[in-house]
């Protein structure tokens, strides 16, 4: 089933949109089947799981961190990941920059936006995104590439649309207001999961993160 699921999603996706396979809790062989079917980007939530899978797949695929990053895991994270989609504070950005300097790596990062302003969720509040953007631009070993959002949990998937729209608005507003942003770098909007990725694409997403739609129920 994994093969068929990946193939079905990939034929439907315009080439400008990147598919991240969200693999939390999945086995090596499940991930292997997805990679064989054409998945090129692995999205991991947890450093420990990422380490285990990195030993197997290494640089055959790209690695995106899509879960919250704790400061004490930064050193390991920078060795594995090609992009950290969940930067949500200055302290974390600085810590990632510092560890990247030590290994001479430039890390692609997205700012995670807590678009529905849910108090229990990670991510930067909408009104704070621009300030963090400006700060991150000062860090020489980070390459800031755009925004990521989870969006709130909704009963009807269509209810998430306004939150995707609002994230896209912030993305565009920042592009216009910060001339120091290189528009070739500032180009990713990571939104949408199994139930919402079509809506996300309609609202401008160009990275989608799919778990159950590839691997089935957890
Ligand atoms: C698990 C997860 C996904 C994928 O969710 P599905 O509903 O399984 O498609 C996407 N993004 C993040 C951050 C996740 O943790």
Image: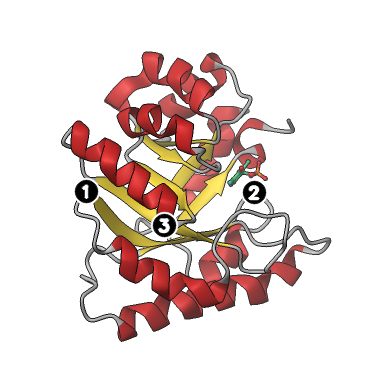
- In this rendering, would 156 be left or right of 162? right
* Residue where numbered disc 3 is placed: 90
Q: Position of residue 92 (x, y in %)?
A: 43, 48
Packing grade of label 3 (10 A; few <14, some 14-19, many >=20) is some
Q: Which mark identifies residue 141?
A: 1
Does label 1 or label 2 sit earlier along the sequence?
1
Lateral position of residue 147 relative to residue 127, left or right: left
Q: Secondary structure at mark 1?
A: loop
By what rule are the colours in the image chosen? secondary structure
Q: Dot 2 lies on which element?
A: loop
Residue 63: x, y in percent?
38, 35
Q: Residue at x 32, y 60 (%)?
A: 145
Would you place residue 98 above or below residue 159 in this image? above
Task: Relative to 91, say whether 151 is above or below.
Answer: below
For the point 47% across and 16% down, the residue is 52
Question: How far is the residue under mark 1 from the one under mark 2?
Answer: 32 Å
In the image, is residue 190 above or below residue 71?
A: below
Q: Which residue is mark 2?
A: 194
Q: Name the residue nearer the viewer: 181 or 29.
A: 181
Tell which circle, 1 or 3, labels the residue nearer the N-terminal end: 3
Residue 94, disc? none
Residue 105 percent coordinates (x, y): 20, 38
Q: CA distance from mark 1 to mark 3?
A: 14 Å
Q: Residue at x 32, y 39 (%)?
A: 82
């Amino acid at each position: 089933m994994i093969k068929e699921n990946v193939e079905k999603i990939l034929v439907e996706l315009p080439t400008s949109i990147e598919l991240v396979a969200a693999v939390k809790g999945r086995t090596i062989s499940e991930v292997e089947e997805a990679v064989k079917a054409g998945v090129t980007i692995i999205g991991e939530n947890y450093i420990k799981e990422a380490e285990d899978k990195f030993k197997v797949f290494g640089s055959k695929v790209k690695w995106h961190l899509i879960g919250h990053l704790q400061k004490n895991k930064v050193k390991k994270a920078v060795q594995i990941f090609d992009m950290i989609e969940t930067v949500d504070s200055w302290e974390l950005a600085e810590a990632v920059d510092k560890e990247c300097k030590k290994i001479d790596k430039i890390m692609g990062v997205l700012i995670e936006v807590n678009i529905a302003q849910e108090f229990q969720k990670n991510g930067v509040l909408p009104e704070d995104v621009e300030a963090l953007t400006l700060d991150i631009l000062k860090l020489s070993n980070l390459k800031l590439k755009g925004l990521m959002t989870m969006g709130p949990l909704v009963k009807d998937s269509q209810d998430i649309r306004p939150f995707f729209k609002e994230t896209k608005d912030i993305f565009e507003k920042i592009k216009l207001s910060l001339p120091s942003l290189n528009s070739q770098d500032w180009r990713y909007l990571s939104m949408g999961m199994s139930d919402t990725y079509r809506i996300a694409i309609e609202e401008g997403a160009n990275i989608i993160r799919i778990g159950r739609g590839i691997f089935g129920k957890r």
